[in-house]
Image (cartoon, helix red, strand yellow):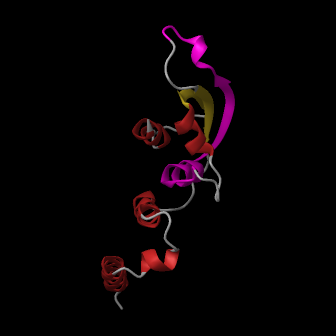
Amino acid sequence: SSALVFKLLSHRPMFRCAVMMFQEEFALRLTARPGEALYCRLSVNTQLLAKVDQLMKVGRNNFRPPPKVESRVVRLELRNPPPPVDFTEWDGMVRLLFNRKNKTLRAVLMTKPTIRLLEENRRTQRALRGD
């Protein structure tokens, strides 16, 4: 489902609104706020690019045969204009921060591979600027 959402969010020309039904846990992740247990990379990236609202809950008894999970209907409204960020770089940072969710930011950023990556990126930026 997340691949579908990100493909939809990157679609051009931009759409005004999309109304979709997802399994309840996925819909809750889309709309989770900082500090909530379900807040994750999906929440951060989706909410960066779109306003996300839960419209209604759809019980399993509305389907034949009934599935094992509940569903929710969600509305996605793209932010127009989109935020001025390089999404690839942003997603890389968010992926890094949520890779070890229960660690502090300091602990995540102070690992040797992360320090090496940040140093390489800094050197690349300086080279591109001519420093």
The residue depicted at 65 percent of the width and 59 percent of the height is 35
**Residue 51 on the magenta segment:** yes
Query: Is 115 left or right of 45, judged from the image as shown?
Result: left
x%, y% of residue 58? 63, 21
Asked if 39 appears above or below 101 in the picture, the reply is above
Q: Residue furthest bottom?
A: 131
**Residue 62 on the magenta segment:** yes
x%, y% of residue 36? 64, 54
Task: Tally the marks.
Answer: 0
Asked if 27 appears above or below 112 in the picture, the reply is above
Front in this rendered view, residue 77 or 115:
115
x%, y% of residue 39? 57, 53
Front in this rendered view, residue 107 or 109:
107
The residue depicted at 59 percent of the width and 13 percent of the height is 61
Q: Quadrant of the C terminus?
A: bottom left
Front in this rendered view, residue 106 or 68:
68
Highlighted range, magenta: 38-65
Q: Residue furthest top?
A: 64
Front in this rendered view, residue 107 or 52:
107
Asked if 131 appears above or below 10 in the picture, the reply is below
Quarter residue 25 falls in = top right
Query: Is 33 left or right of 23, judged from the image as shown?
Result: right
Asked if 8 appears above or below 33 in the picture, the reply is above
The residue depicted at 45 percent of the width and 58 percent of the height is 87
